[in-house]
Image (cartoon, rainbow, N blue to C red):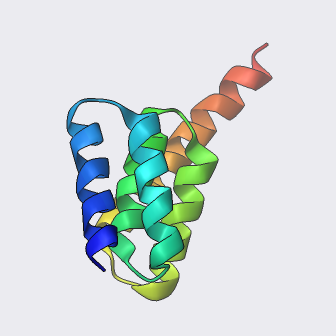
Amino acid sequence: MEKFKRLKNEGNDFVKMGEYEEAVNKYSDCIKLNTEECTVYTNRALCYLKLYKYEEAKQDCDHVLQIEDSNIKAFYRRALAYKGLQVRKKNVAGI
């Protein structure tokens, strides 16, 4: 559990510095240690949104909502992911 906390804190620090790829890596390592900790998924979803990886963000939020069906951050970030996917779909259609 100590390693999990350390990795999560490192991920949080990377987010604060705007280093989203590095944060994703730390959060992914956390998930390997504990697949039930929802905050790691919502944090990683935030990073995916910043990296324009909307499908990945949506998947993380979907996972959280299977565990906690009233997680506000997961609902909000999933909505942002859907919005990003819609914008991308419109841009592709316009090409």
Q: Residue furthest front?
A: 3
Seen at 50% across and 79% down, the residue is 35
Q: Position of residue 54 (x, y in %)?
A: 57, 44
Placement of the N terminus among the 4 image quadrants: bottom left
Q: Is residue 14 shown above or below 9?
A: above
Left or right for 18, reference 89: left
Seen at 68% across and 28% down, the residue is 90
Seen at 42% across and 57% down, the residue is 27
Placement of the C terminus among the 4 image quadrants: top right
Q: Is residue 20 shown above or below 93?
A: below
Q: Position of residue 84 (x, y in %)?
A: 53, 38
> Observer-nearest residue: 3 or 89?
3
How many numbered dots are placed on residues in this image?
0
Seen at 20% across and 37% down, the residue is 16
Left or right for 62, reference 42: right
- Mark yes or no: residue 84 visible: yes
> Observer-nearest residue: 67 or 14?
14
Q: Is residue 41 shown above or below 70?
A: above
Left or right for 56, reference 47: right
- Mark yes or no: residue 80 visible: no
Q: Quadrant of residue 63?
A: bottom right
Q: Residue furthest top?
A: 95
Q: Is residue 63 shown above or below 12?
A: below
Q: Position of residue 77 (x, y in %)?
A: 40, 55
